[in-house]
Image: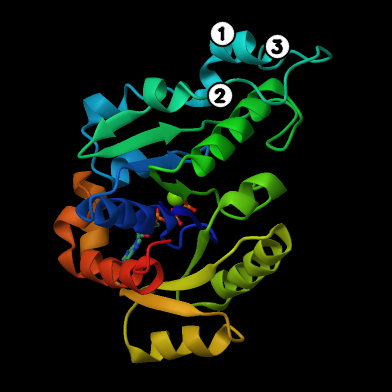
Amino acid sequence: MPKIAITGKGGVGKTSFASLMAYVMVEQGHKVYAIDADPNATLAQALGFPPELASTVTPIVELADLIEERTGARPGEYGRMFKLNPRVDDIPARFSVAHRNIHLLQMGTVRGAGAGCVCPENAMLKTLVTHLLLREKETVIMDMVAGLEHLGRGTAGAVDAMFAVVEPGTRSIQTAKAIYRLAEELGVARFWVVGNKVRHERDAAFIRDSLDGLPVVGMLPYSDQAIEADIQSKALYDIAPELAEKTRQIVEAVLGQGA
Ligand SMILES: Nc1ncnc2c1ncn2[C@@H]1O[C@H](COP(=O)(O)OP(=O)(O)OP(=O)(O)O)[C@@H](O)[C@H]1O
Ligand SMILES: [Mg+2]
């Protein structure tokens, strides 16, 4: 089952695309784990999880007692020894929240020494993500924070398809190129660019012509329904059939052979 990471510059539509893809995978009968790896978590909302359900999701880094039990040290506790590979196999089932066959996990915000610190909470997150990426039966879709710094060598190597979302504009295209170079270095098996917020053929041509040959797997149109979904806190998938259909085509193009 595919293990997918969605990356790109801030605000380009990573979370929107991740939400569309999650539902398209469910349509195809997959059991989907949607991982919100962005500290500023918005995936539950994009997926249209009912607010009372979304509010029950506990970010993994906030499970201080569990982190201590599993790693031997509490988040924020410095100078203590801790396990780098704690037991995590029970965590996806215990701490995800499910809606329409999408199981959502939120990673949360690592405080203190910084997002990349060698600390118990990061050991927990890293081990958990790697564990999910190695499980066979589930499809995993990770909505990443803008950039790639947090995606370590082991984790990236286990991702089998990475998408970089771009919008018509030079900045997101520069970011996609930087992500591609890093992804290649980290051993990501397959990499595609998805254009988003495309208004007309000129936008599409701009994206295609600016990418120096990076493969563009599809383009999603600019859609007022994206804004409407956000206002109404509804799943984009439900109110924007055109975006859902384009996502279906992308999924078929890249994963049709069964990734
Ligand atoms: N196809 C689209 N047409 C119009 N607006 C869109 C489209 N896709 C996304 N948007 C809008 O762009 C904004 C950013 O989208 P989204 O949150 O999915 O991006 P992101 O890359 O996840 O952002 P962040 O970096 O903050 O996590 C939202 O207001 C969303 O409604
Ligand atoms: Mg986002």
**Residue 194 seen in this snapshot:** yes
Which percent across, then down, holds residue 156?
A: 63, 52
Q: Residues within 10 Å of mark 2 (few under 14, many from 20)?
A: many
Q: Quadrant of residue 121?
A: top right
Residue type at mark 3: give it.
Ala
Residue type at mark 2: give it.
Val
Depth check, front residue: 12 or 160: 160
Is the C terminus in the top left, top right, bottom left or bottom right quadrant?
bottom left
Q: Secondary structure at mark 2?
A: helix
Distance between the Cα atoms at labels 2 and 3?
Answer: 13 Å
- Lower sequence index among marks 1 and 3: 1
Residue 37 in the image: above or below residue 153:
above
Which residue is at 51% across, 32% downward?
107
Residue type at mark 1: give it.
Asp
Q: Secondary structure at mark 1?
A: helix
> Residue pushed farthest right?
79
Q: Which residue is mark 1?
A: 65
Name the side, left or right, on which 240 lies relative to 192. left
Depth check, front residue: 168 or 120: 120
Contact? badges 1 and 2 (CB < 8 Å): no
Q: Which residue is mark 2?
A: 61
Which percent across, then down, holds residue 93?
A: 38, 25
Distance between the Cα atoms at labels 1 and 2?
Answer: 10 Å
Distance between the Cα atoms at labels 1 and 3?
Answer: 9 Å
Q: Which residue is mark 3?
A: 73
